[in-house]
Amino acid sequence: MTSRSRKLAAKVKRALGEHRASTGEAAGFAYAANLWFYLVAIVAGLLYGLYFS
């Protein structure tokens, strides 16, 4: 992980922490897992598109 992605991850975690506080632990965790999955999928798709286009 680069420092940029680590900073982004920290920012996302902080936002999710605030979200979790308002919705409850389990709901917040499920939301975070889904968000993280989509984020990784989008980045992977962009990188794939850049390298193999």
Image (spheres, grey):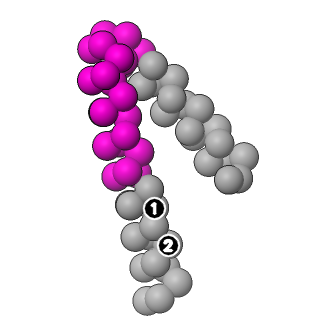
Is 43 on the left or on the right of 31, as rendered? right
Q: Which residue is mark 1?
A: 43
What kind of residue is marked 1?
Val
The residue under the point 36% across, 28% down is 29
- 52 relative to 24, above or below: below
Is 18 on the left or on the right of 10, as rendered? left
Which structural element holds mark 2? helix
| Magenta-highlighted residues | 18-39
Which structural element holds mark 1? helix
The quadrant of the image that shows the C terminus is: bottom left
Q: Indicate whether residue 32 is drawn in magenta.
A: yes
- Seen as rendered, the residue at the extreme bottom is 53
Query: CA gap, disc 1 to disc 2?
Result: 6 Å
Q: Indicate whether residue 16 is drawn in magenta.
A: no
Residue 28: % across, % down: 33, 24
SS assignment for the magenta stretch, majority: helix
Q: Which residue is mark 2?
A: 47
Residue 17: % across, % down: 45, 19
